[in-house]
Amino acid sequence: MDRCVKYECMKIYEIYNTDENIGPAPASACSRPAKDLPASWISSCKSQGKRKRTGNRSEKVGGKTMKVSGKRIKGNKYGGPLPDYSK
């Protein structure tokens, strides 16, 4: 008897098959609404300077401390002034 009568079932490879969402976001994806993008692509678009940053965070940009919310500032990986805290 099938145990997936009430609920929609997925195979393990369907859950972990995220090859299309790995790596930096393509330039064309950054113009789409945030609800249509995976979280990693939204972060990548912000780091590339193609999407405005969110949050109430202050960072040193050009020697001055300033709020980065609402600004399109590139991350260090893409040649911008914001440091990379993931390391």
Image: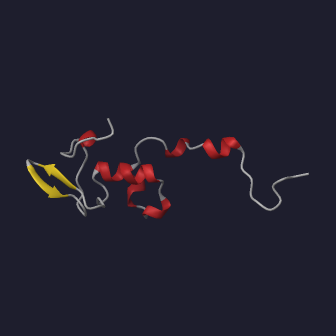
- The way the protein has been coloured in the rendering is secondary structure
Question: Along the line of sight, which residue is nearer the eye, 58 or 52?
Answer: 58
- Left or right: 82 as drawn, with respect to 21: left
Number of numbered discs visible in the structure rendering: 0
In the rendered image of this protein, does residue 25 appear above or below residue 7?
above
Q: Position of residue 16 (x, y in %)?
A: 61, 42
What residue lies at 55% left-to-right and 41% top-to-bottom? 19
- Left or right: 13 as drawn, with respect to 87: right
What quarter of the picture does the C terminus occupy? Answer: top left
Residue at the extreme left of the image, as rendered:
63
Q: Position of residue 44 (x, y in %)?
A: 37, 48
In the rendered image of this protein, does residue 4 appear above or below residue 77?
below
What residue lies at 43% left-to-right and 62% top-to-bottom? 34
Quadrant hosting residue 85 = top left
Q: Position of residue 13 (x, y in %)?
A: 67, 41
Residue at the extreme right of the image, as rendered:
1
Question: Along the line of sight, which residue is nearer the eye, 50 or 84?
Answer: 84
Question: Along the line of sight, which residue is nearer the eye, 44 or 3?
Answer: 3
- Left or right: 32 as drawn, with respect to 58: right
What residue lies at 66% left-to-right and 45% top-to-bottom? 14
Q: Position of residue 76 (x, y in %)?
A: 24, 41
- Left or right: 57 as drawn, with respect to 66: right
